[in-house]
Amino acid sequence: MPTPSFEAIRILGHRLREARRRIGLNQYDVAHESMVDAANYGRLERGEGNPTLLTLLRLSVRLGVEPGELLAGLNDQELLPEQARPFTVSEFRREQERRGNG
């Protein structure tokens, strides 16, 4: 299964890294104290992971940030991968017409 990689995940990784650096811990310590696999945590910081809600909650507690701080503004559809973006009605109709189904 390919590792997800898109702008929202990259931004989340940057926020995790910045929060970790602010409190002066290394990746291993944050991962260990959050009960998260160290390799997985490293992938998250590099913008290569797709964390569960539980993982985000554990990390936010250890990093001393609200989960909302980590996720703020990531609901912009331009930050999502193309295949995850919802179609607008006009996009749907255009595609239907292109395929001859409209």
Image (cartoon, grey):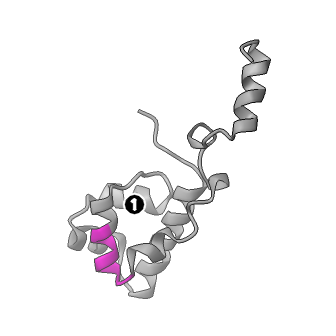
Is residue 76 in the magenta section?
no
Residue 76 sits in quarter: bottom right
Q: Quadrant of the C terminus?
A: top right
Residue type indicated by callout 1: Gly
Q: Position of residue 9 (x, y in %)?
A: 52, 57
Residue 10 in the figure: left or right of residue 50: right
Vertical arrangement, residue 81 with respect to residue 33, above or below: above
Q: Which residue is drawn at 79% across and 19% down?
A: 98
Q: Name the residue under label 1.
A: 42
Q: Position of residue 86 (x, y in %)?
A: 60, 42
Residue stretch rendered in magenta on the structure: 57-65
Is residue 62 in the magenta section?
yes
Q: Which residue is drawn at 41% across and 51% down?
A: 50
Depth check: 15 or 83 in front?
Answer: 83
Residue 65 in the figure: left or right of residue 101: left
Residue 8 sits in quarter: bottom right
Q: Which residue is drawn at 63% across and 53% down?
A: 77
Q: Where is residue 65 in the image (x, y as percent from the top left)?
A: 39, 82
Vertical arrangement, residue 32 with respect to residue 83, above or below: below
